[in-house]
Amino acid sequence: NNTKMRVSQPQPLRSDFLPDRLLSNYVFFNHLYVVMISMVMVAVGIYARLMKHAEAAMACLAVDPAILLIVVGILMFLITFCGCIGSLRENICLLQTFSICLTVVFLLQLAAGVLGFVFSDKARGKVSEIINNAVVHYRDDLDLQNLIDYGQKEFSCCGGISYKDWSQNMYFNCTADNPSRERCSVPYSCCLHAADQAVINTMCGQGMQAMNYLEASEFIYTNGCIDKLVNWIHSNLFLLGGIALGLAIPQLVGILLSQILISQIKDQIKLQFYNQQHRADPWY
Protein backbone atom coordinates (compact mmCIF):
# COMPACT_ATOMS: atom_id res chain seq x y z
CA ASN A 1 0.00 0.00 0.00
CA ASN A 2 1.23 3.31 -0.97
CA THR A 3 1.13 5.69 1.86
CA LYS A 4 0.47 9.27 1.11
CA MET A 5 3.16 11.59 2.23
CA ARG A 6 1.94 14.55 4.17
CA VAL A 7 3.22 17.88 3.02
CA SER A 8 4.09 20.13 5.87
CA GLN A 9 4.16 23.87 5.50
CA PRO A 10 6.55 25.87 7.62
CA GLN A 11 4.79 27.94 10.21
CA PRO A 12 5.64 31.62 10.11
CA LEU A 13 7.91 32.53 12.95
CA ARG A 14 6.43 34.67 15.65
CA SER A 15 8.52 37.63 16.61
CA ASP A 16 9.71 38.52 20.02
CA PHE A 17 11.27 41.61 18.48
CA LEU A 18 8.18 43.40 17.18
CA PRO A 19 8.21 47.08 18.08
CA ASP A 20 6.69 47.52 21.49
CA ARG A 21 3.54 49.59 20.98
CA LEU A 22 3.80 50.99 24.49
CA LEU A 23 7.35 52.14 23.76
CA SER A 24 6.29 53.67 20.45
CA ASN A 25 3.36 55.48 22.07
CA TYR A 26 5.57 56.70 24.91
CA VAL A 27 8.10 58.15 22.48
CA PHE A 28 5.28 59.74 20.47
CA PHE A 29 3.53 61.46 23.38
CA ASN A 30 6.87 62.39 24.96
CA HIS A 31 7.71 64.36 21.82
CA LEU A 32 4.20 65.67 21.24
CA TYR A 33 4.20 67.99 24.23
CA VAL A 34 7.64 69.33 23.23
CA VAL A 35 6.24 70.04 19.75
CA MET A 36 3.38 71.98 21.35
CA ILE A 37 5.80 73.96 23.54
CA SER A 38 7.98 74.81 20.53
CA MET A 39 4.92 75.98 18.56
CA VAL A 40 3.91 78.25 21.45
CA MET A 41 7.46 79.65 21.59
CA VAL A 42 7.44 80.41 17.86
CA ALA A 43 3.98 81.99 18.09
CA VAL A 44 5.00 84.22 21.02
CA GLY A 45 8.22 85.22 19.26
CA ILE A 46 6.42 86.10 16.01
CA TYR A 47 3.77 88.06 17.92
CA ALA A 48 6.48 90.00 19.76
CA ARG A 49 8.21 90.84 16.49
CA LEU A 50 5.01 91.98 14.77
CA MET A 51 4.12 94.27 17.67
CA LYS A 52 7.37 96.23 17.32
CA HIS A 53 8.02 99.18 15.06
CA ALA A 54 9.77 98.30 11.81
CA GLU A 55 12.73 100.64 12.43
CA ALA A 56 13.44 99.21 15.86
CA ALA A 57 12.89 95.67 14.63
CA MET A 58 15.57 96.00 11.97
CA ALA A 59 18.02 97.86 14.21
CA CYS A 60 18.72 95.15 16.74
CA LEU A 61 18.11 91.74 15.23
CA ALA A 62 21.26 90.34 16.84
CA VAL A 63 20.14 91.08 20.42
CA ASP A 64 16.37 90.69 20.09
CA PRO A 65 14.95 88.11 22.56
CA ALA A 66 12.01 87.53 20.18
CA ILE A 67 14.39 86.35 17.44
CA LEU A 68 16.08 83.98 19.90
CA LEU A 69 12.67 82.65 20.91
CA ILE A 70 11.68 82.05 17.28
CA VAL A 71 14.96 80.33 16.34
CA VAL A 72 14.95 78.03 19.39
CA GLY A 73 11.26 77.24 18.86
CA ILE A 74 11.76 76.33 15.19
CA LEU A 75 14.74 74.09 15.95
CA MET A 76 12.83 72.35 18.76
CA PHE A 77 9.83 71.87 16.47
CA LEU A 78 11.84 70.37 13.60
CA ILE A 79 13.78 67.96 15.82
CA THR A 80 10.82 66.79 17.90
CA PHE A 81 8.58 66.60 14.81
CA CYS A 82 10.95 64.00 13.36
CA GLY A 83 10.84 61.99 16.59
CA CYS A 84 7.08 62.35 16.96
CA ILE A 85 6.13 61.30 13.42
CA GLY A 86 8.92 58.73 13.27
CA SER A 87 7.67 56.94 16.37
CA LEU A 88 4.04 57.15 15.23
CA ARG A 89 4.72 55.79 11.73
CA GLU A 90 7.67 53.62 12.81
CA ASN A 91 9.80 55.37 10.21
CA ILE A 92 13.48 54.51 10.56
CA CYS A 93 14.66 57.54 8.56
CA LEU A 94 12.83 60.08 10.75
CA LEU A 95 13.84 58.34 13.96
CA GLN A 96 17.46 58.25 12.83
CA THR A 97 17.30 61.95 11.93
CA PHE A 98 15.86 62.74 15.36
CA SER A 99 18.53 60.67 17.10
CA ILE A 100 21.37 62.29 15.14
CA CYS A 101 20.07 65.83 15.71
CA LEU A 102 19.60 65.21 19.42
CA THR A 103 23.11 63.77 19.65
CA VAL A 104 24.56 66.81 17.85
CA VAL A 105 22.69 69.19 20.20
CA PHE A 106 23.92 67.27 23.24
CA LEU A 107 27.53 67.29 21.99
CA LEU A 108 27.34 71.03 21.23
CA GLN A 109 26.05 71.72 24.72
CA LEU A 110 28.82 69.59 26.20
CA ALA A 111 31.46 71.28 24.05
CA ALA A 112 30.15 74.75 24.97
CA GLY A 113 30.35 73.88 28.67
CA VAL A 114 33.88 72.49 28.38
CA LEU A 115 35.14 75.37 26.21
CA GLY A 116 33.52 77.93 28.51
CA PHE A 117 35.31 76.36 31.47
CA VAL A 118 38.69 75.95 29.75
CA PHE A 119 38.69 79.29 27.96
CA SER A 120 36.97 81.27 30.69
CA ASP A 121 38.75 84.52 29.75
CA LYS A 122 37.56 84.36 26.14
CA ALA A 123 34.07 83.37 27.29
CA ARG A 124 34.03 86.37 29.61
CA GLY A 125 35.11 88.60 26.72
CA LYS A 126 32.27 87.26 24.57
CA VAL A 127 29.75 87.85 27.37
CA SER A 128 31.12 91.39 27.77
CA GLU A 129 30.67 91.97 24.03
CA ILE A 130 27.06 90.76 24.17
CA ILE A 131 26.25 92.95 27.18
CA ASN A 132 27.84 96.03 25.60
CA ASN A 133 25.87 95.41 22.41
CA ALA A 134 22.70 95.15 24.49
CA VAL A 135 23.56 98.44 26.22
CA VAL A 136 23.93 100.17 22.84
CA HIS A 137 20.46 98.98 21.72
CA TYR A 138 18.75 99.49 25.08
CA ARG A 139 16.16 101.98 23.81
CA ASP A 140 15.67 100.24 20.45
CA ASP A 141 13.81 97.20 21.73
CA LEU A 142 11.24 97.06 24.53
CA ASP A 143 11.84 93.35 25.25
CA LEU A 144 15.59 93.91 25.47
CA GLN A 145 15.05 96.93 27.69
CA ASN A 146 12.89 94.93 30.11
CA LEU A 147 15.44 92.11 30.12
CA ILE A 148 18.32 94.46 30.97
CA ASP A 149 16.29 96.22 33.67
CA TYR A 150 15.38 92.87 35.22
CA GLY A 151 19.01 91.71 35.17
CA GLN A 152 20.34 94.92 36.73
CA LYS A 153 17.74 94.86 39.50
CA GLU A 154 18.20 91.13 40.14
CA PHE A 155 22.02 91.26 40.30
CA SER A 156 22.22 94.76 41.82
CA CYS A 157 24.53 95.98 39.07
CA CYS A 158 24.76 98.67 36.41
CA GLY A 159 26.31 98.41 32.94
CA GLY A 160 28.90 95.87 31.81
CA ILE A 161 32.10 96.78 33.66
CA SER A 162 30.75 99.83 35.49
CA TYR A 163 27.86 102.29 35.43
CA LYS A 164 29.80 104.51 33.00
CA ASP A 165 29.35 101.90 30.26
CA TRP A 166 25.94 103.48 29.67
CA SER A 167 27.74 106.29 27.88
CA GLN A 168 27.94 103.88 24.92
CA ASN A 169 24.21 104.36 24.42
CA MET A 170 23.30 107.36 22.27
CA TYR A 171 20.61 108.52 24.69
CA PHE A 172 22.80 108.24 27.83
CA ASN A 173 26.01 109.42 26.16
CA CYS A 174 27.84 111.92 28.37
CA THR A 175 29.42 114.09 25.66
CA ALA A 176 28.65 117.81 25.70
CA ASP A 177 26.99 117.81 22.26
CA ASN A 178 24.41 115.16 23.17
CA PRO A 179 20.96 116.84 23.04
CA SER A 180 19.17 113.99 24.83
CA ARG A 181 17.38 114.79 28.09
CA GLU A 182 18.91 111.54 29.46
CA ARG A 183 22.46 112.76 28.86
CA CYS A 184 24.91 111.41 31.48
CA SER A 185 22.12 109.35 33.06
CA VAL A 186 21.66 105.63 33.76
CA PRO A 187 18.45 103.55 33.64
CA TYR A 188 16.22 103.58 36.71
CA SER A 189 17.05 99.88 37.28
CA CYS A 190 20.53 100.98 38.41
CA CYS A 191 19.12 103.03 41.29
CA LEU A 192 19.10 102.05 44.95
CA HIS A 193 15.51 101.74 46.11
CA ALA A 194 14.15 101.53 49.63
CA ALA A 195 12.33 98.30 50.47
CA ASP A 196 9.16 100.18 51.40
CA GLN A 197 9.21 102.48 48.36
CA ALA A 198 5.82 102.24 46.68
CA VAL A 199 6.39 104.54 43.68
CA ILE A 200 9.60 104.18 41.65
CA ASN A 201 11.21 107.35 40.34
CA THR A 202 12.20 106.47 36.76
CA MET A 203 14.40 109.59 36.56
CA CYS A 204 16.50 108.65 39.58
CA GLY A 205 19.56 107.98 37.39
CA GLN A 206 19.72 111.54 36.08
CA GLY A 207 23.32 112.84 35.82
CA MET A 208 24.88 109.87 37.63
CA GLN A 209 27.65 109.36 35.06
CA ALA A 210 28.98 112.84 35.82
CA MET A 211 29.65 111.77 39.43
CA ASN A 212 32.65 109.79 40.65
CA TYR A 213 32.31 106.30 42.11
CA LEU A 214 31.96 107.38 45.75
CA GLU A 215 29.33 109.99 45.00
CA ALA A 216 27.37 107.77 42.62
CA SER A 217 27.45 104.77 44.97
CA GLU A 218 25.10 106.62 47.34
CA PHE A 219 22.37 106.60 44.69
CA ILE A 220 23.03 103.76 42.22
CA TYR A 221 24.82 100.43 41.84
CA THR A 222 28.28 101.22 40.52
CA ASN A 223 29.57 97.67 39.96
CA GLY A 224 29.17 96.13 36.50
CA CYS A 225 26.97 93.16 35.74
CA ILE A 226 29.76 90.98 34.32
CA ASP A 227 31.55 90.61 37.66
CA LYS A 228 28.23 90.09 39.43
CA LEU A 229 27.25 87.40 36.92
CA VAL A 230 30.60 85.60 37.27
CA ASN A 231 30.34 85.67 41.07
CA TRP A 232 26.77 84.35 40.88
CA ILE A 233 27.90 81.47 38.64
CA HIS A 234 30.70 80.56 41.04
CA SER A 235 28.28 80.64 43.97
CA ASN A 236 25.66 78.47 42.23
CA LEU A 237 27.74 75.80 40.51
CA PHE A 238 25.71 72.98 42.06
CA LEU A 239 22.45 74.57 40.90
CA LEU A 240 23.78 75.05 37.37
CA GLY A 241 25.13 71.50 37.38
CA GLY A 242 21.70 70.21 38.39
CA ILE A 243 20.03 72.21 35.61
CA ALA A 244 22.55 70.92 33.07
CA LEU A 245 21.96 67.35 34.25
CA GLY A 246 18.20 67.87 34.09
CA LEU A 247 18.56 68.99 30.46
CA ALA A 248 20.97 66.20 29.53
CA ILE A 249 18.99 63.25 30.95
CA PRO A 250 15.87 63.70 28.74
CA GLN A 251 18.13 64.07 25.71
CA LEU A 252 20.04 60.87 26.49
CA VAL A 253 16.78 59.03 27.21
CA GLY A 254 15.35 60.25 23.90
CA ILE A 255 18.44 59.05 22.02
CA LEU A 256 18.36 55.66 23.77
CA LEU A 257 14.64 55.07 23.22
CA SER A 258 14.83 56.05 19.56
CA GLN A 259 17.71 53.63 19.00
CA ILE A 260 15.81 50.83 20.75
CA LEU A 261 12.75 51.52 18.59
CA ILE A 262 14.89 51.58 15.43
CA SER A 263 16.43 48.24 16.38
CA GLN A 264 12.99 46.67 16.96
CA ILE A 265 11.67 47.97 13.63
CA LYS A 266 14.68 46.51 11.81
CA ASP A 267 14.11 43.14 13.51
CA GLN A 268 10.48 43.20 12.41
CA ILE A 269 11.46 43.92 8.80
CA LYS A 270 13.98 41.06 8.81
CA LEU A 271 11.41 38.68 10.27
CA GLN A 272 8.76 39.61 7.72
CA PHE A 273 11.24 39.08 4.91
CA TYR A 274 12.21 35.68 6.36
CA ASN A 275 8.57 34.54 6.59
CA GLN A 276 7.84 35.68 3.04
CA GLN A 277 10.77 33.64 1.70
CA HIS A 278 9.74 30.44 3.46
CA ARG A 279 6.10 30.64 2.47
CA ALA A 280 7.27 30.31 -1.12
CA ASP A 281 9.44 27.22 -0.32
CA PRO A 282 7.36 24.62 1.55
CA TRP A 283 9.00 21.57 3.11
CA TYR A 284 8.27 18.17 1.61
Image (cartoon, grey):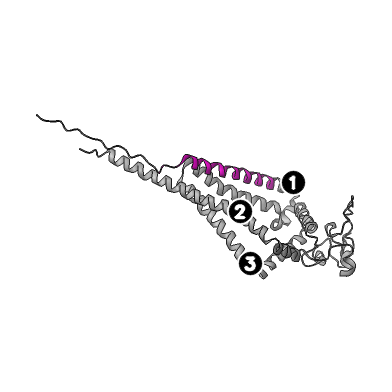
Identify which residue, 55 or 263, lies in the foreground. 263
Q: What's the magenta bit mostly, secondary-structure-wise?
A: helix
The quadrant of the image that shows the C terminus is top left
Looking at the rendered structure, the number of numbered marks drawn on it comes to 3
Relative vertical location of residue 61 with respect to residue 121 in this rendering, above or below: above
Can residue 137 be seen from the camera position used here?
Answer: yes
Could you say whether the residue bearing mark 2 is in a helix, strand or loop? helix
Residue 65 left/right relative to 178: left
Magenta-colored span: 17-46
Q: Amino acid at mark 3?
A: Phe
Identify which residue, 247 or 126, lies in the foreground. 247
Q: Residue at x 46, y 46 (%)?
A: 261
Q: Amino acid at mark 1?
A: Met
Relative vertical location of residue 146 with respect to residue 209 in this rendering, above or below: above
Q: Which residue is mark 2?
A: 247
Please report whichever mark, 1 or 3, sits nearer to the chain's N-terminal start: 1
Q: Which residue is mark 3?
A: 117
Q: Amino acid at mark 2?
A: Leu
In the image, farthest residue toward the front: 238
| Residue 114, position as x, y percentages in the image | 60, 65
Given this view, does label 1 or label 2 mark the residue nearer the observer? 2
Gap between marks 2 and 3 measured at Cα: 18 Å
Checking the image for residue 51, the label placed there is 1
Checking the image for residue 183, the label placed there is none
